[in-house]
Amino acid sequence: MATSTLLIYGSYGYVGDLIAREAIDRGLDPILAGRSRDDLREQVDELGRPGRRFSLEDPGAVDEALVDVDCVVNCAGPFSNTAEPLVEGCIRSGADYVDITGEIPVIESIQDLDGKAREAGVTMLPAAALSTIPMDCLAAHLADRLPEADHLALGVDAVRIPSIGTVRTVLEGADTEGAVRRDGRVEHVPTAWQTREIDFGRGERPAVTMPMGDISTAHYTTGVPNVEMYAMLPQPARLALKSHRYLSPVFESKPVRWLLKQLAGVRDGPSEWARERGTAYVWGEATVGDDGEGDPDERVVSRLRTPDPYVVTADGAVTVAERVLEGDADAGFQTPAGAFGPEFVFELEGVEGFFDEVTPEASSPVSSLLQ
Ligand SMILES: NC(=O)c1ccc[n+]([C@@H]2O[C@H](COP(=O)([O-])OP(=O)(O)OC[C@H]3O[C@@H](n4cnc5c(N)ncnc54)[C@H](OP(=O)(O)O)[C@@H]3O)[C@@H](O)[C@H]2O)c1
């Protein structure tokens, strides 16, 4: 049987390199790809795999590069600049598409191409990363526990130093402010719109709403019309985020954004030592009939614990690519749990859960285990 061809675009970035090494360790023999000749050559020499240099600005070059490819994993963020040309190229060439975006507009624009991808027989599965695989599987699990749920609140406690690429992506999207899903639609809200004390699995922590891709994926997976995504933030970070409302004209001025992007211009991220010790606590709540006063008719809560966000991202992206290459995902726009079910998250190494709270008031025996 002919082997399938996997191409990793942005393979020499911080996360791209983690994903390339993981794919090689699993025997997937990927083609390494990106736009920089020097960075790609250096990685090709080190990892001993074939390289393919092409820019996304020329659709003809994209088509030529994808001609013999079965699946693309796009690691080149900000994805607002890279997803569209690669998705369009995949639809033209018949390759499946996977990425690690957490950007809401990118996920929404890929979802808009669902019909075209189905016609072409192409799977498009964005957000195969920490945000979204665990959150999406948790959302599907909560919807199974409470099928009539009309509101999902999801959250993550994973404080750590982000990679420079993540900082750059946040800066690119800094003018999009906050976002939640209300009545099925993405609604823009102020930065840090809602704050809440959440027990992610190690006691209550302060959290704020964040515009993460999960408000798209959890909605498409479960059909629940209202979704909020929270992230644990310590007090200084919360204040900084809130002040961003008032400082945003400063951040958005061209010279300041240029300077911040230059400062973020060094490619790096958490060390192997830090990745081995990192943990993420993932929390979710499904409710029915929440009147906004915190007194719903019914409420269920579940949790997960995962390894370090960057470890989950590399493991998750490669596991999704493997399943897509095996033909396990249908054509069209897919979410991780939509394609593979809520239990898919346990295919990733070191993920523990689902820890279900039996009643809202009862202290969860499992959450105390996690402290
Ligand atoms: N969803 C999640 O949970 C999650 C987790 C981790 C990371 N991420 C996201 O993943 C992305 C990558 O992070 P990182 O830390 O690996 O960043 P990084 O080290 O800066 O790498 C980014 C890569 O993208 C390439 N790239 C950027 N813009 C491009 C363009 N217009 N055309 C072609 N290539 C382009 C870069 O190539 P050049 O050097 O040639 O520019 C580089 O290879 C970020 O957007 C980050 O937010 C998401």
Image (cartoon, rainbow, N blue to C red):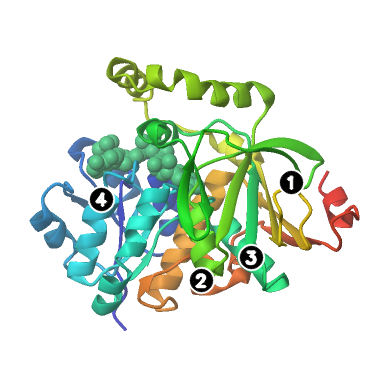
With respect to residue 204, does 139 lie above or below? below
Query: To which residue does mark 3 refer?
Result: 346
Query: To which residue does mark 4 refer?
Result: 33
First in residue order: circle 3 vs circle 1: 1
Frontmost of labels 2 and 4 is 2
Under mark 2, the amino acid is Gly
Under mark 4, the amino acid is Ala
Give residue 104's position: percent from left, percent from top.
42, 49
Q: Is residue 50 visible?
A: no
Under mark 1, the amino acid is Phe
Number of other residues with Cα within 10 Å of mark 1, as a class: few under 14, some 14 to 19, many 20 or more:
many
- Quadrant position of ligand 1: top left
The secondary structure type at the circle numbered 1 is: loop
Measured in 3D between alpha carbons, the distance from the residue under mark 3 to the one under mark 4, in whole angstroms, is: 29 Å
In the image, which disc is placed on residue 200?
A: 1
Query: To which residue does mark 2 refer?
Result: 338
Instruction: Kindly identify the residue that appears in the image at 58 percent across and 55 percent down.
Output: 227
Measured in 3D between alpha carbons, the distance from the residue under mark 4 to the one under mark 1, in whole angstroms, is: 38 Å
The secondary structure type at the circle numbered 2 is: helix
